[in-house]
Image (cartoon, rainbow, N blue to C red):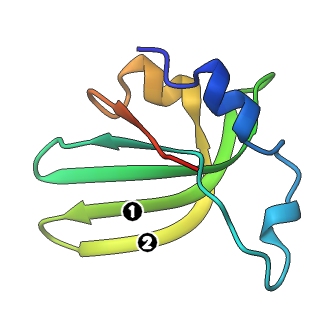
Amino acid sequence: MKLITKDILNKTPALSGKTRSLGAQVKFTARFVNSNQPHMISWCLAEYNPVTGTAWGMIDEYTTTEGFTIRWDYFSIPALESGTYGLVKRISLNS
């Protein structure tokens, strides 16, 4: 499944680090989720490089051993689309 639509691409800032400056308000343009028990992951897209497929945003994970963890990090859209993390679905966010 193609996760990045033209609409999402147009709304998502380039991968530049500008949204990561101190005090900056981060706006998510899409959310991608899997529900592979017992390890569920949600990726919230804030910045994206369409050439490399590299994205940056918030990653929210749940495992039965660790519970919930939230971190800000890079992630790969091609890896999400390839099935590396199981079936990943896109949830577009209204802006």
Seen in the picture, residue 84 relative to 1 is either above or below; the reply is below
Q: Give amino acid for label 2.
A: Ile
Seen in the picture, residue 42 relative to 82 is either above or below; the reply is below
Mark 2 falls on what kind of element? strand
**Callout 2 environment at 10 Å: few (<14), some (14 to 19), or many (20+)?**
few
Q: Which residue occupies 28% across, 73% down?
A: 68
Q: Quadrant of residue 50?
A: top right
Q: Which residue is mark 1?
A: 60
Front one among 18 and 94: 94
Q: Give amino acid for label 1.
A: Asp
Label 2 near label 1: C-beta < 8 Å?
yes
Quadrant location of the N terminus in the rendered image: top left
Q: What residue occupies the far front of the structure in this picture? A: 95
Is 67 left or right of 73, judged from the image as shown? left
Is 49 left or right of 62, judged from the image as shown? right
Q: Which residue is mark 2?
A: 70
Mark 1 vs mark 2: which is more N-terminal? 1
Q: Which residue occupies 17% across, 41% down?
A: 36
